[in-house]
Image (cartoon, rainbow, N blue to C red):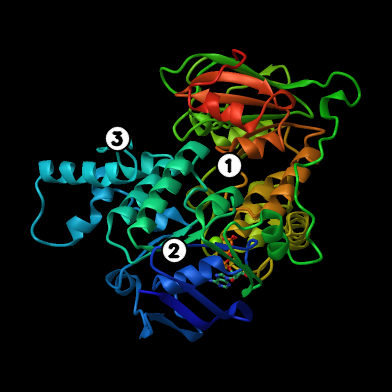
Amino acid sequence: MTFAVTSLSKVYGGTAALSSVDLEVRPGEIVGLVGTNGAGKSTLIKILSGAAKPSSGTLSFDGRSLSFAGPLDAQAAGVQTVHQNIDDGVVFGATVAENLTLDSLAGGGGAPGWFQTRARVRAAASAVAPGLGLPLDAPVETLPAGARQQIVIARALSRRARLLILDEPTSTLSAVEADALVARVKQAAATGVAVLYVSHRLSEIETLCDRVVVLRDGRVVRTFTAPPDRAAIVTAMLGPVAATEPGSAPRPPGAEVGGPAREVLVAEGVRAVPGGREFGLRVRAGEVLGVTGLVGAGKTELLEQLAGARPLLSGRLLLDGAPYRPTDPRAAIEAGVAFAAEERAAQAVVPGWSVRAHVTLPWLRAHSRAGLLAPRSETAAARRVADLFGVRGPGIEAPIEALSGGNQQKVVVGRWLEGTPRLLLLDEPFRGVDVGARADIGRVVREHAREMGVVVASCDPQELIGLADRVLVLHEGGPAGELPVAETTAERLAALMSGTGEGVPA
Ligand SMILES: Nc1ncnc2c1ncn2[C@@H]1O[C@H](COP(=O)(O)OP(=O)(O)OP(=O)(O)O)[C@@H](O)[C@H]1O
Ligand SMILES: [Mg+2]
């Protein structure tokens, strides 16, 4: 059952998102689809999954042409998709159990009894990861993004698929959880499922894919067969001019500049989650503290407490030596604490609003003159952010949803560097951002860190090694260790994350 697209094109307004794309995925084959932010990956996937219509070109299964009226049509034809925006795949207001069993509930045959539902949930959950360990009765919106992503993936894997499509499935998962997913995808392929897999994590692409297709500016520029050469993939993605292998961001001396820098943040006796072990934190100006841990380890909960987005569980905070106890995010911003939250779709993106408005939203006062917004100052700010991070797409006046996922992420992270916070908190800033832009974000954050303290949470220890001075590892809500990056490796951090490594007590 070979799945093929031929001469596929998609035009949005004046932008060609895809131009004459040819692609085949054969049964049992895992095809990697890579490309920089805005290359056209999600557009291709939306067309394959019936969520968007092509401007021209055809889809076919074994030579028989297909046309999908909508997503349900594609599912009926055996195309199962996990979209990049995971919240397209969960129903808010319903429980975890209900979300995992949506298909059987929607399938008619009378309302299943509670016990039946629970049994099915267990089957669906253990199909993707034995002991998924999610609270079945919790409303799905109370779960962190990583847990919601696991639900969406579990559901896609439990359905019978001929073509399984995964768009950035691991962007909210830590390395350990991602490895489990990779194993599951391999199993599915071994049973004859054709797989199309999008990821910015090239190590995953390397271990998983039989073939790798590189998209650039909406065109297929190269195809690699396994084992693909990572450097050659990066070159093909970025194009001949921009292709310098993005290594870790150069690390300016930070705290060493001009003697011992002031302590921006001191936290004493804080907890990441209720019942977690207490610990302390210190961040100086010019310093970047990384925080890592598995999904559920408490990274987001910790940052949200520092940002006034949830009440401090215990202990006390000092900001530049003065007591700091924000009651809400507005109070935190006023105290000089900026927080780029983890969940772009739910917390940062306002559909219909322009890119410009998203950049200036937190800084309205700075862009106002006598209570009125000053459009020129707003436009200048939006241009700066777009240039600094290489935001590509239809321009700063376009609605934000016309940008690719990674470009939206650059906007909502970059806008926090427009102000001059004392403490900058970034939760998963690299989610869905391509290798080139990761290096850009890292560089800009390091440059800004000369005047401020920065705390970056990421489930990927490798990302923190390129950016942070020290890394705090959380395990089940408590500190598993805090290590200077100069003295650690991604493997050592991963061991601490899973609760097996030895660290320096935090
Ligand atoms: N609804 C839309 N309206 C206008 N332009 C759009 C729309 N959706 C996508 N585009 C444009 O199409 C191009 C391809 O976007 P797409 O989302 O497919 O990129 P991608 O490869 O998935 O990138 P990322 O890695 O950032 O997710 C981009 O230039 C984007 O701005
Ligand atoms: Mg995308």
Identify which residue, 260 or 203, lies in the foreground. 203
Q: Is 246 rendered above or below residue 446?
A: below
Sequence-first disc among 1 and 3: 3
The residue carrying pointer 3 sits among few (fewer than 14), some (14 to 19) or many (20 or more) residues within 10 Å by Cα, namely few
Q: Position of residue 20 (x, y in %)?
A: 58, 83
Residue sitting at x 42%, y 46%? 183
Q: Which residue is mark 2?
A: 29
Would you identify the image quadrant in which residue 252 lies? top right
Sequence-first disc among 2 and 1: 2
Of the 4 image quadrants, the one containing the C terminus is: top right
Identify which residue, 13 or 245, lies in the foreground. 245
Q: CA distance from mark 2 to mark 1?
A: 31 Å
The residue carrying pointer 2 sits among few (fewer than 14), some (14 to 19) or many (20 or more) residues within 10 Å by Cα, namely many
**Does residue 391 appear in the picture of this structure?**
no
Q: Is residue 67 left or right of residue 5?
A: left
Q: Secondary structure at mark 1?
A: loop
Q: Position of residue 243 (x, y in %)?
A: 78, 60
Q: Are marks 2 and 3 in contact (CB under 8 Å)?
A: no
Of the 4 image quadrants, the one containing the N terminus is: bottom left
Residue 428 is labelled as 1
Q: Is 31 rendered above or below residue 93?
A: below
Would you identify the image quadrant in which residue 143 lies? top left
Q: Secondary structure at mark 3?
A: loop
Residue sitting at x 65%, y 55%? 434
Sequence-first disc among 2 and 3: 2
Q: Position of residue 126 (x, y in %)?
A: 28, 41
